[in-house]
Structures are given as C-alpha cells and as structure tokens.
Amino acid sequence: MCPGVWIVLFFYLGHIEVTSGDIYSSMLTIQQALDTEKVLTEHLAAYLEEETYRLNDLHRFYNKVSALHRIADTSVSDPIFAYTLLKRLQSEWMNVVDSLENNDNLRVLKDGYKKVEKNLPVLEDVEGAAKGLMRLQDVYSLNVKGLTQGVFQSGRSSQLGVLYKPDQVSSMSADDCFHIGKIAYDMQDFYHSIPWLEEAVSKFQDSYGRWFTEDQGSLQDALDYLAFSYYKTGNVSRALDLSRECLLYDPYNMRLALNVAKYEKILDETPAGEDVLAPNLLRPNVTHLRTRDLYEGLCRTLGSQTFRYEDPRLKCSYDANSPYLVLQPLKKEVVNTTPYIVLYHDFVTDYEAKKIKELAAPWLQRSVVASGMQQAQAEYRISKSAWLKDTADPVTRNLDTRIAAATGLHAKAPYAEYLQVVNYGIGGHYEPHFDHATSRKSPLYRTNAGNRIATFMIYLSSVDLGGATAFIYANFTTPVVKNAAIFWWNLHRNGEGNEDMLHAGCPVLLGSKWVANKWIHEYGQEFNRPCGLNPGE
C-alpha cells in the first residue's frame, strides 16, 4: 500500500478525534463528519484494492515456494535450486515480511521471522552462491540461458549438449539473474555480468507491468547496469541503444540522459568509415592459475576416461598384504602408474560414511589454505571442513588402523594429521594444488613431523554430476565413487615433492560431495618407505 494513503487516513482520523467532543452539537458539523467519512471510504476502497493486489501477490509467492518444497527432496543438490533458496532466505522473505502491514496476525509472522533471522543466510552467502554458479558456467562451458531455465547445457550455442535436465525444473526469476549480473558487475567482471543481465532484461520485459513483492531489481536497473557493462567493454553502440531504452521507462533520470549524450558524442567523433566493432568478451585472467585450461578440460570429462588411457598395467586385485587384511582383503584398483595412484573400492561401509559425516557436521567451518606462514580462506577453495581425532569414535579409530594396513604407513598422530572431513557447497571446488608443502615456511612444518609424504582420501558420498578429482600433469581424472578411497605419494623417496601430483577437486555440478582426508607425514615412516637417491622414485 502507498504510504500516502496511510498519511491521509491518519490525518482524517486525527481530525475526527480532535473535534469529536462537539460534533453532535451542530448538524453542520455532523454533515461535515459525513463528508469526512465519505473521504475515508474512498481511501479505504483504494486501500482494499491495493491490499487485494498485495494479497494476490503473496498468494503467488506462497504458491511458488510451496511448489519448490514439493520437489525439495530431489532438488536440494541442484545448484540452481540451492542458489534460489539462499537468495529467497537472504532477501526475498525479508522483502515480503517488511512489506506487510502491522496488524496482530502480521505481527506474529514478523515475530516468527525475527526468531529465525539469526539463522538466515547473509548477503555474503548469496554472493558466494552466485560466484559458484558463474564458476560452473566457466568450468563446464554452461549456457547461461539454459541455467536460467534449470537445465545444464554445455558447448557452443549452435551445438549445445544437455548434461542435466531435472524432472522438476528450478528456473530463475528476472531478479535472480539481475542479482548475479550485478555481483559480477560490482567485481568489474563484465564477461559474466553481460549474459546474466541480458537474461534479466529479457525476463523483466516478459513480466513488465507486474510487480513482485520479493524483487529488489527492476527492468530499469537491469538495462542501466547492462548498458554500462557494454560501455566498459568498448561496445558503445550497444550501450547507447540500451540507455535510450532505459530512458523510455525513466525519462527524468538525468544521469541516464548524460550517459546517452556521452555515448552519442563518442560515436559522432568516430572517423567516417571507421566501424566501432564490438570487441570479443574475454574471460577475466586468473594469475594464480596457470593450468586453468588443462584443469577445466579435465573437469569437463566428468571423470570418464577415453580409450587412450587404457593400459595393461592398470589392473584390479585383492590386497591382503597386511595381517589385518587377511580375512577381509581390500578391493584395489591401480588407476595410474606414473605417478602411482590407487583406488580402494568399498573402503568404508555406508554406516561408517554416515557416522563420519554426523561426527563432523557440528564442527564444519570454512576451509582454509596455506598462505605464507599463515592459513586463510581463499576463493580457489570453496568448502567447509572439520577435524576428527581418532578418539572421537570407534569408527575413526578403526579407520586409522585400516588406512595403515592399506598403505603400510603409520596413520595415527603424530605421524599423520587428524582426519579432515570436507563438504563442498554450490560450485564447491579446490583448484589445482599440491597437498605437500612447497616452502619451508609452510604451516605444515609446525607439526615437527616433516612434509606430507602421502594422501589418503575417502569419498563419503556420491554426486550426480561433476566433482571429479583431476590430476593435471598426469592428465586424467577419477570420478567420485562412494565409499571408495584414493591413495597417492606426494613425495619422492628422496624427500623432494612430486610435481606430477598437482591435482584439483573439480566443481560439483549436482549433488553434495563429502570427502575425508588423511595426510600422512614423512617422519616415522623411515622403515615403512625407505629413502632413495633416485629422484624418479
């Protein structure tokens, strides 16, 4: 309802209250009172009309959310569904609740909202989710229009292949698209802002004339941001067209008018015969990731291997090399020989995987990486993690024993780190990195147990799409195999780091990826893995 309506209502109510003491003493004042009531009735009619529209809009929002909850069990791992959920909880519900008038029933709703407010996502959560979608867009070459429709389409526009299409589509609204485009715009990332804002403009135009309570953006906003995005990329002609269109909806916006004049002047000053070509949009350069093309190319295989990776040396066997394994040998698969990488199938049971996740869940915090002599959060590692001691539960204690039997190494502290349990979020990933320290200043050396000699990683869940482990220089990937574990050596026998072990956790396209890492250090392993002088060993 327009605030002006309430101002007039309160004005007249106040007027009646002040003069009510002597209204009955004159028919003239009674007639005036009737006229006053007529005005109130007119305003009440206007209020009811506005309120009916608002209630219809709330019904629309309720039906939209209710329909999404009917498919929530199967869609919660869908990153589009997850992004729109976070955005609804962070801003849309707040906009809806704040739009409600302050009567008793609505006060109850507001009080209920306040009680859970501390548990709601903040703006940074929604921004992180938006960046996750842009990451998926890049790594898997996903089409933006398909994403807005809840469909994962990969490849060029003329030859799109459908990677995933859910039975119940989690489509995105114009405001959803606008929010992602604006986040990219605020980062000066016009490579991403332009396609998302184009979709926002298209969707706002389709619904123009209809106002949705939960929205923050508008057609004018989307046109304005899109125009300036094109200007910043050198496409002045397109920026001018969009700014002129925006002026049609907002004719008194002086800033827009000045932008139009500026763009017209730039084009007028262009020498005759010299075309102002629209430059190709270039993806932002990432200085810290020199192997981006290799990494993303491997991720796009989604863990599948082509025939050229077939090798007779890659084989499966039962491993009973430890007395612990005699009665229950491990299912061992050699997935790569140089460097040597092994996959143990069914290394944990469903119960053990579930128990480890339950133990870790209350302690999950944003994962960190080594940064000089400190540890810090980083955009190239998006996940939450927790550390479990072997004393946390019999499951973790037995797990250490089993890892030691499989590797022939001491797997308990102080020879190894505690079990790190990791859960990845929307577009969750870990860009190419080494598990071992590449500098003596690394925090890893504070344990006085030397460098990380080996990695043992357990897949505690399956994922529907993406999330493969990519070995960059070895040029292959392993998919997420629930309950399986993967093992590799980080150091050569001479103690030097193995450069071939550069690896990455590809972004999760669909599903919830859980892993448990056991990093084993070199001290105390001298007799289990004797040193050698050959740098290739």
Image (tube, rainbow, N blue to C red):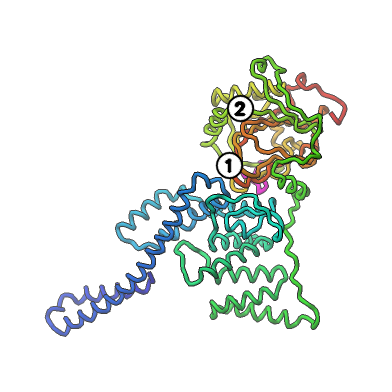
Residue 490 coordinates in the image, percent (x, y): 76, 32
**Residue range highlighted in magenta:** 375-384
**Residue type at numbered disc 2:** Val
Q: For residue 380: magenta?
A: yes
The residue at which mark 1 appears reads as 512
Going 30% across and 74% down the picture, which residue do you hit?
A: 45
| Residue 348's disc number | 2
In the image, what residue occupies the spot 57% across and 40% down?
365
Nearest to the observer: residue 221 or residue 278: 278
Residue 364 image position (x, y, % from top left): 55, 38
Whether residue 75 is visible here, answered yes or no, is yes
Q: Which mark is residue 529?
A: none
Quadrant of the rendered image containing residue 43: bottom left
| Amino acid type of the residue that numbered disc 1 sits on in the rendered structure | Ser
What residue appears at the point 52 percent right and 51 percent down from the top-left corner?
A: 168
Q: Nearer the viewer, residue 359 or 134?
A: 134
Closer to the camera in the image, 9 or 244: 244
